[in-house]
């Protein structure tokens, strides 16, 4: 069977789970992991048998690169990797800049005869596909996306950036109709002023629009859990018939799911003509391993 | 704006709701309804302003035909309509014969430069897309499809066919893990033997494998309600991480949803190259009305 050779760029939360998801996938083979020069020695057990390099070009015959990097670094890497003739998959999640990013990558992908699948995770990603499904079933109505309970990566990073914070954690708690409460847990730096830290957090643009509670704890590490969830709800109209009710709910290990979705997106990418795609632009069958008619027979 | 002209073949439960869904759709225009010769006079109010004919060829400039016919009649009509150079959409639901049906239509569609979208309803249809999504998020595990509570069209037809039954209704009740109870309500013909009728129902292949309860009522009509629902559940593995939990649930007017899904499928059909497709083979964005980048901006 044809095995696609995959590289992982970055080795944080998502990168670790990508190693597992690629190894569990019947049609992918892990070519190696690209890390910063300061991290290539002193490897964790998971990477002992895997080529670890400091530049993608040091790996042989890579068909697809997974960009497991902080979201703001993703576009520049994606452009570079695509231009070197390698498919890319990322989970870029800045909703507001996504359309422009897709346009830029689309040109590069077409110029080099490759594909990029962007924003492949669970939101944006599979949640986006569900929102489209809800919309097709009931074109008129409201969809609410309720996140959590679970740790928000973006909000946690924002907490950690505040002066006086030694370590932090922000949980997203759904309060219904797409609104959220932020539960922030803070381990203070020695001598920091708790009320100044609390005020700085509540004034931060990540938190200023939501109900936010700050709790000080001796050890944030003791609270960490990567479980997350979402509840998508729509009440809408099919034709002229009102009160059509739809719900999608999941409770998952967050980075494990993101990594698995990225692997499926890589597979779908190999089945498209050159260009850049969001997940809603690819047929759902293309994400699945297996022969087309066998999938239709089993899933339809 | 470009309006596609649509015909409805058949005017039962689904046909009635297709009239509404087409009229509510911004990109479709209802060209007319094809009915049996004995039904073209004495029209219901809904059809007063609409061309009603006995053959599709009597309607001008039809771009797509919706086959709102009993499922066994669908393939022959689809082949004929496609061969006349008109796209088709149906909600064919015989799972076991679907792959062969798709193969036959695919040849005809390609020969005539048209598209057919088959099995476009909620199961098969949107449920199939959800099953694929669950599979891509957690490739290992079990998905259960739990139908109801709601009226089963197929089982109700089977009840009505039994000798001694004046009118009947079969409700599907989910009992979990993809198993179902059948609640059958029967209005007896005068002089019919209740216990013979009950035995015949329970021996019918539609009922013999499920827990079935038969209740005799004076008027089945008083019980009719087209509300239906489904609960799709998966517990599975993303990468090497177990206990990933997914749920999709809906409570809907059944024929209204089916008609709306068929309208979306027609729209998607116009956006494909010639061929025959099940819903899982088309990008979910193609089912939605609107400009591509605007949809990406809103939904992703």
Image (tube, coloured by chain):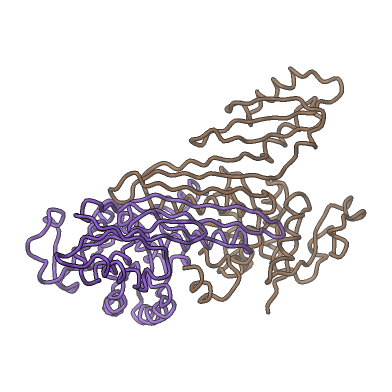
Chain colours: A brown, B purple
Q: Tell me if residue B125 can be seen.
A: yes
Which image quarter: residue A147? top right
Looking at the image, which residue is at 38% across and 82% down? B104
Q: Position of residue A170 (x, y in %)?
A: 69, 34
Which image quarter: residue B93? bottom left
Q: Residue furthest right?
A: A42
Looking at the image, which residue is at 62% across and 67% down? A267
Question: In front here: A216 or A10?
Answer: A216
B86 sits left or right of A73 in the view = left
Which image quarter: residue B49? bottom left
Q: Position of residue B255 (x, y in %)?
A: 30, 57
Question: In front here: A76 or B199?
Answer: B199
Q: Position of residue B11 (x, y in %)?
A: 20, 63
Quadrant holding the N terminus of chain A:
bottom right
Q: Position of residue B95 (x, y in %)?
A: 42, 72
Give above or below for A115 relative to A293: above
B143 sits left or right of A143 in the view = right
**Count of numbered badges drawn on the protein:** 0
Question: In front here: B233 or A148?
Answer: B233
Q: Residue furthest left?
A: B41
Looking at the image, which residue is at 48% across and 46% down? B298
Question: In front here: B281 or B158?
Answer: B158
Q: Tell me if residue B65 can be seen.
A: no
A41 sits left or right of A141 in the view = right
Looking at the image, which residue is at 73% across and 55% down? A17
């Amino acid at each position: 069977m044809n095995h696609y050779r995959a590289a992982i760029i970055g080795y944080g939360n998502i990168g670790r789970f990508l190693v597992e998801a690629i190894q569990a996938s019947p049609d992918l083979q892990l070519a190696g992991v690209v890390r910063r020069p300061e991290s290539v020695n002193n490897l964790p057990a998971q990477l002992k048998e895997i080529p670890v390099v400091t530049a993608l070009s040091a790996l042989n015959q890579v068909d697809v690169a997974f960009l497991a990097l902080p979201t703001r670094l993703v576009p520049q890497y994606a452009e570079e990797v695509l231009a070197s003739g390698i498919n890319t998959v990322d989970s870029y999640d800045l909703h507001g800049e996504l359309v422009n990013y897709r346009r830029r990558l689309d040109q590069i992908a077409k110029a080099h005869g490759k594909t990029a699948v962007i924003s492949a995770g669970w939101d944006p990603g599979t949640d986006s596909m569900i929102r489209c499904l809800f919309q097709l079933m009931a074109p008129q109505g409201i969809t609410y996306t309720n996140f959590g309970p679970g740790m928000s990566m973006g909000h946690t990073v924002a907490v950690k950036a505040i002066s006086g914070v030694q370590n932090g954690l922000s949980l997203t708690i759904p309060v219904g109709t797409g609104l959220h409460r932020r539960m922030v847990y803070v381990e203070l730096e020695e001598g920091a002023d708790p009320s100044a830290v609390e005020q700085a957090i509540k004034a931060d643009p990540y938190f200023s629009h939501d109900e936010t509670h700050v709790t000080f704890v001796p050890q944030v590490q003791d609270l960490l859990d990567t479980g997350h969830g979402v509840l998508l709800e729509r009440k809408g109209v099919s034709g002229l018939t009102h009160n059509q009710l739809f719900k999608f709910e999941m409770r998952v290990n967050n980075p494990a799911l993101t990594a698995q979705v990225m692997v499926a997106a890589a597979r779908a990418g190999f089945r498209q003509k050159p260009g850049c795609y969001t997940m809603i632009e690819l047929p759902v069958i293309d994400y699945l391993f297996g022969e087309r008619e066998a999938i239709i027979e089993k899933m339809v």
